[in-house]
Amino acid sequence: MEINLNNQVAVVTGGSRGIGAATVKLLGQAGAKVVFSYRKAAQAAHEVVRNGEAPPGSVTPVRADVSKMKDSGKLIESAILRHGRLDILVANAGIWNADDLPIDKMTEREWDEMMAINLKGVYSVIHYAVPHMKSLGSGSIVVISSTAGQRGEAFHTHYGASKGAVISLVKGLSTELAPHRIRVNCLAPGWVDTDMCIPVLRNRRQARRINAGIPLGRFAQPEEIAMPILFLASPMASYITGEILNANGGNVLCG
């Protein structure tokens, strides 16, 4: 049985690179019409459209900074104006600090930026998406967290805190929105071979140390994270809500 998302409309935040770009591609291949956001990488966003293997006009990039309420509203409204409905939301946009940042050296600006994108950016798009899903009487929201949100991460504590917060948000929203037949789930990746992790991948000693702690022995490819996102978004997961699906190669075994 193949996943079929024909006649469904999806919004993906942070869709120009990495996990987001892979998710846009798979949703489009499954038949969904996809609107995705990018913050700065316009060229990369248009490459996603060109390389998406979806019918012309079915994948649309929108420049939006989801840490700003106005931009999140514009993103959701773009999907509604273009396609008339919203069935799937993948809240993927996020940042991470590649360099170690001790708590006593962390500035207020660094803390606020992390929370604005990783936490407020999730809240803001859900805030604008939910009314449209309620009007349909159905919907699927998939939020991207991290293993750091489950166990914390030294020297990246603001990142871990933001990702732990979205897990709690998912748990609360899953019961709040269940009466409207809106499912809310979370995908928690471990290390993934994306632009965000390039500084680590280039450090061979550090990469070897990390791989040694992953039972499967390697970083994930973005497509390996996008596939479970597609599953959670699809009717195949119709009886799953409030769950944290771990995709980390066995690196963090959470019950």
Image: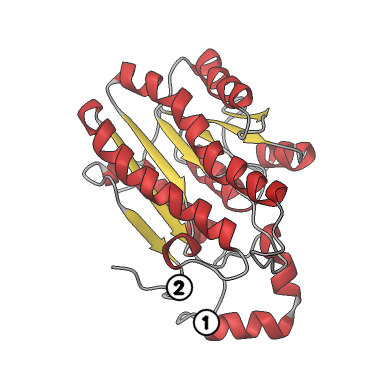
- For image coordinates 34% across by 69% down, the residue present is 254
Q: Which label belongs to residue 217?
A: 1
- From the top left corner, tell me how far across and down residue 9 is, in percent: 45, 27
Query: Is tag 1's residue or tag 2's residue first in the polypeptide sequence?
Result: 1
- From the top left corner, tell me how far across and down residue 156 is, in percent: 61, 64
For label 2, the SS is loop
Mark 1 residue crowding within 10 angstroms, few (<14) / some (14–19) / many (20+): some
* Of 176 and 205, the residue lying toward us: 176
* Of 144 and 104, the residue lying toward us: 104
- For image coordinates 36% across by 73% down, the residue present is 253
For label 1, the SS is loop
| Residue 243 shown left or right of residue 129 in the figure | left
- From the top left corner, tell me how far across and down residue 100 is, in percent: 69, 69
* Of 119 and 5, the residue lying toward us: 119
Mark 2 residue crowding within 10 angstroms, few (<14) / some (14–19) / many (20+): some
- From the top left corner, tell me how far across and down residue 73 is, in percent: 56, 21
| Residue 9 shown left or right of residue 99 in the figure | left
Question: Based on the displayed image, in which of its 4 quarters is residue 82 positioned?
Answer: top right
Residue sitting farthest toward the right:
43
Q: Is residue 33 visible?
A: no
Q: Which label belongs to residue 249?
A: 2
- For image coordinates 44% across by 49% down, the residue present is 165
Q: Which label belongs to residue 36?
A: none
